[in-house]
């Protein structure tokens, strides 16, 4: 069996679903760093650090989700274009 074409939209959706938890993990790590940093340097800017940490929980999953969408779209388009030139990928499937 030869895989000659990938659905670009479905690949992009899967890529977004993979990248959002990664962004959430990055946001959590950055939030912990932002919340712990005032303890290291004193109370200067502690309020700002707290808001930046909470802001990271929201923005990093969005950033990684958008990144995943772009990567998924590009990968699907590139794969479909390359398979037109060189053929598809051979896949063995069993029932």
Image (cartoon, rainbow, N blue to C red):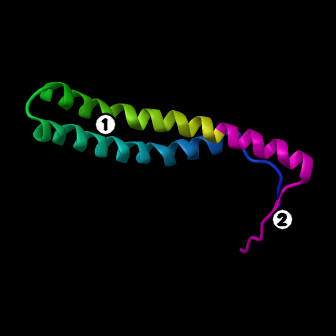
Question: Residue 50: image x %, image y %?
Answer: 18, 31
Q: Are marks 2 and 1 in contact (CB under 8 Å)?
A: no
Give 38 or 2, whichever is nearer the viewer. 38
Q: Residues within 10 Å of mark 2 (few under 14, many from 20)?
A: few
Give 95 or 18, whichever is nearer the viewer. 18
Question: Residue 74: image x %, image y %?
Answer: 69, 38
Is 9 displayed left or right of 51 in the figure?
right
Task: For mark 1, give the secondary structure.
Answer: helix
| Separation of marks 2 and 1 at Cα, in angstroms | 43 Å
Question: Residue 4: image x %, image y %?
Answer: 83, 52
Look at 83% across and 65% down and name the residue there: 1
Find the magenta span and give its range.
Answer: 73-95
Which of label 2 and label 1 is nearer to you? Answer: 1
Q: Residue furthest bottom?
A: 94
Give 82 or 38, whichever is nearer the viewer. 38
Question: Residue 72: image x %, image y %?
Answer: 63, 41
User: Is residue 94 found inside the magenta-colored segment of the image?
Assistant: yes
**Quarter of image, res 36:** top left
Task: For mark 2, give the secondary structure.
Answer: loop
Q: Residue furthest left?
A: 43
Look at 50% across and 49% down and name the residue there: 18
Q: Main secondary structure of the magenta part?
A: helix
**Quarter of image, res 76:** top right
Mark 2 or mark 1: which comes first in sequence? 2
**Quarter of image, res 12:** top right
Q: Residue furthest front?
A: 41
Q: Which residue is mark 1?
A: 57
Residue 1 got which mark? 2
């Amino acid at each position: 069996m030869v895989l000659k074409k990938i659905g670009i939209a479905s690949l992009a959706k899967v890529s977004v679903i993979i990248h959002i938890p990664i962004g959430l993990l990055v946001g959590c790590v950055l939030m912990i760093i932002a919340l712990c940093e005032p303890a290291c340097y004193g109370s200067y800017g502690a309020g700002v650090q707290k808001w930046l940490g909470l802001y990271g929980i929201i923005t990093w999953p969005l950033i990684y989700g958008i990144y995943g969408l772009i990567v998924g779209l590009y990968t699907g388009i590139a794969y479909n274009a390359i398979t037109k030139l060189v053929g598809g990928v051979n896949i063995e499937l069993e029932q």
